[in-house]
Image (cartoon, rainbow, N blue to C red):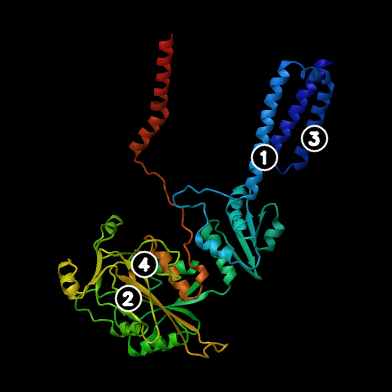
Amino acid sequence: MKRLLGLLGWLGVVLVLLAVVIRFVKPELQSWYQGLALAGLVVTALYALSQWRDIGRSFQGRNVQYGSVALGSVLLLLVILGFINWIGKREHKRWDLTVAKQFSLSDQTKKILAGLTKPVAVHVFYDSQSTPVSEYKDRLGEYEFLSGQVKADYIDANHDPIKARQFNIQQVPTIVLEYDGRTERTSSTDEQGITNALKKVIEGQAKKVYFVQGHGEHSPDDSGKTGYAGFAAALKNDNFDQAKVTLAQEQKIPDDASLLVVAGPKTDYLPQEIDLLRGYLRRGGKLLLMLDPPDKADAPPLANLIAFAKEWGIDVGTNVVVDANPMGQLLGTNEATPIATPAQGSSHPITNDFREMTAYPLARSVTPIPGGVNGHTAQKLMETGRQSWAETDLKTLFASGKAEPNPDKGDLMGPVSLAAAVTGAGDAGATAGGAPPEARLVVVGDSDFICDAAINFQGNRDLALNMTNWLAQQEDMIAIRPRDPADRRITMTQDQGFWTWMIAIFIIPGLLFLSAFMVWWKRR
């Protein structure tokens, strides 16, 4: 009989273990593992009742005291662990130790979430056989924690085909966002894809950016080193549509233009084109004007464009900025590519939270005129270091490739301003309410800093997007954007791979075995 009761105890343990295994291997068999767990607990309880005499005797003697101390320690540890979990459930704190902070949400995402005023429903359609749901919960859980307006639900498309058909899911994973009656979807599961979809569903209609053409400007369709294809893609991610316009042909600026970009014209604009730009700003237009320095000593100046910038309180210098700081060479640039950071004392929204370096291949000075012009007072945005200057002797510079600072000849000593921004009131009555719209203008002394060869340098991309979002009156979008995780793989030759394998498999274990053998031999 005792033997049979002993087997009863083992049977209870086996049933409980079997329930645990089924729970993790086949979670869909819920009724099975719940039934087995219940049966195991009942059998174990019957076994404990049959052994009540032995259990009672075990509580007598000195061993009970030791056992009580051990049991009390275990219970205390469990209480402490439970208390830590209780705190952890209410206090959301994580430490991201990766170099690129790839597990932390960017400043831009945090700004967007903080500005939500209406609920966002996020439907994540996935395939549990290929990717566990925890991968999506880890990312979207951060969104839910930072904003109570975000609610996510996770649908296995294979187990719930009706809901997948309802949202017209063609592939997995697909994330569908619903906000204020609008819907946006993305197949990307990283932060950049999710945040871009969130921006689009919040803003609704995309704003239109027009790139002026006809004078050798950079093209958003050009994917070469001097093209703007990368910048155009970045604008699309920030919910901007782009198109091209030739002012001399169209004789007007399109009515749906949220922003106009003049990117490095090689020849000066005609007076009629300048008049179009003036009229656009008077109507409350937004303009990003990027003017490169002369590429040779006898190059004709962009007189009309420079005079147009001066009307708005910005002086565009006829010079080339030279940066003698050796830091630039460490970063892969030369003296003709100055490194700039936000201007000292500047509190402009474009650079308020911007803390990165930017590089400008062949730039000219762009300086606010003291006291302003026509009621327009500009602000500096970016400036170079103290070891830089704006060289005015272009003939010597282009002939010899060398330059020395000479303030007596008109050289502007560093720090040198490379970009400036200004606002101004447009014509009253231009808006439906009768209030004058606000015109905005940003002037930069270089257009190559956002071409495909330079846009990925440090903060170049973020600065350009900050400028466009400020011009489009989207200050809440000005922030550091999501970064792609850094590729930190180690590439080795076949010989290096072989020796790494030998060291890991044979040499290190062999040395440990030899050390153990020597210890054994000495003790012997």
Name the one closer to the observer, 344 or 340.
Answer: 344
**Local SS, label 2:** strand
Q: Earlier in the sequence, mark 4 or mark 1?
A: 1
Q: How far, Cα to Cα, is label 1 from label 3?
A: 25 Å
Looking at the image, is mark 3 or mark 4 earlier in the sequence?
3
Tell me the kind of residue under disc 2.
Answer: Thr
Q: CA distance from mark 2 to mark 4?
A: 14 Å
362 vs 426: above or below: above
The spot of residue 426 in percent (x, y) is 47, 87
Residue type at mark 4 is Gln
Task: Say which quarter of the image contains residue 298.
Answer: bottom left
Q: Which residue is mark 2?
A: 367
Specify which label sits upstream in the sequence, 1 or 3: 3
CA gap, disc 3 to disc 4? 71 Å
> Of label 2 and label 4, which has the lower sequence position?
4
| Residue on which the image places disc 3 | 38
Q: CA distance from mark 4 to mark 1?
A: 51 Å
Amino acid type indicated by mark 1: Gly
Identify the secondary structure beneath mark 1.
Answer: helix
> Dot 1, crowdedness within 10 Å: few (<14), some or many (≥20)?
few
Task: Check residue 82 in the rendering and tell me which mark sits there, or answer none.
Answer: 1
Q: Which residue is mark 4?
A: 344
- CB under 8 Å between discs 2 and 3: no
